[in-house]
Every structure is written in C-alpha cells, then in structure tokens.
Image: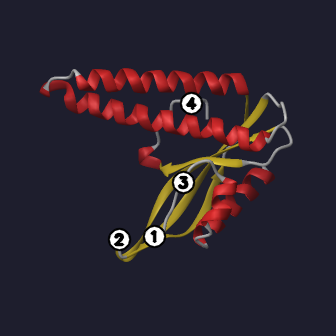
Amino acid sequence: MRAARHAAERYLATLAAHDWAAARSLASCHVGGPEFRGATLLRIGVSQSMSTRTLDSLAGAARDEERRAAVELAAADEETADSLGLRADAAARRSRMLGDAVRAAAMSRAGRADSVLRVCRVRVRVRWGGPLVGPEPVDREHLLRAVAAGGGPWIVFSMVARDRDPGGGPF
C-alpha cells in the first residue's frame, strides 16, 4: 500500500506543479490542467489482484457495451433518448477508463511478462481554481485508480470526480 500511496502523491504533485511531461510518465490518462491547484489523499483502498487476461476481458466487454449503447441511442425516439444518452455516456466513460487501465498495465510491465496485476483505488480531495473555476477555489472529491504489474511501478489510469465515476469493474 505504501508504494501505491507514494505513486498517487507523486502524480498529484506533478499535476500541481503543472509538469505535464512527468505526469505522462506516471499515468495513462490525462487529468488536470492549469486549474489544478493541489490535492489531498483521503483514503487508500485495499489493493486487489487480477490477471492481465481478466483486465483485457473487462476492457473488451466495456468496448462492446459502448458500441451497443451508441447504436441504441442512434435508433432511439424522443421518449427514451435521455436515458439512453446517460447510458451511452456512462458506457463511454467506463470503456475509456478500462482502456487506460490496459495501457497503464503495459506501462507498468515495461516488457516483463507479468500476468498478475495489483489495482488500487484512492479517494482524493482536489482543489480547482483560476478564472475558469470562478473567484473562489473549489474542492471536489475524486477517485484515483492505479495499477502495478509484478515488481513494476504503480501507474495511474483514472482520476474522475466521484459523482462521474463510471464504476463497472472489480476496482
């Protein structure tokens, strides 16, 4: 857990410093921007194990669900378009998150053939500020997810506002 905490702290510090090159080396997703002011770790979740094959299967199922939801939305009438739009949006976010998890696992493996991954979820409070946010900084709770392969480093693959979390995975 200590390594996951350290990786999350390091990633959040690079975002706060607006060091985008370092952030890209620590994550497979893009988060932040000039409005990112800082973050505080609230809770480190329990690390869970899964196989690379399981993660690939989850990512494939999420892509299929995203395609099905998009097709259903395209064929929807006015009565069902709103609910199908919400479903399509959630499916797209879940697919993006799991695709980023697959890329993060590959970054962590870095050529090794490890098939066992560790996945961790971290609750963080992020401070957003600046002209796009408004006159006062805003704190919002986010969920950060990271993955590590065997002896590889922890790589962040998702950081979303808690109310926008797509869920849909064992982590």
- Pick the front one: 150 or 42: 150
2 or 4: tag closer to the N-terminus = 2
For the question of whether residue 119 can be seen, the reply is no
2 or 1: tag closer to the N-terminus = 1
Foreground disc of the pair 1, 3: 3
Q: Amino acid at mark 3?
A: His
Quadrant of the rendered image containing residue 38? bottom right
Q: Name which residue lies at 57% across and 49% down.
A: 29
Cα separation, mark 4 vs mark 1, equals 29 Å
Q: Amino acid at mark 2?
A: Leu
Residue 54, relative to residue 114: is it above or below?
Answer: above
Q: Amino acid at mark 1?
A: Glu
2 or 3: tag closer to the N-terminus = 3
Say which element carries label 1. loop
Q: Label 3 belongs to which residue?
A: 30
Q: Name which residue lies at 72% across and 27% down.
A: 52
Cα separation, mark 3 vs mark 4, equals 20 Å
Q: Amino acid at mark 4?
A: Gly
Q: Label 1 belongs to which residue?
A: 35
Q: Label 4 belongs to which residue?
A: 169
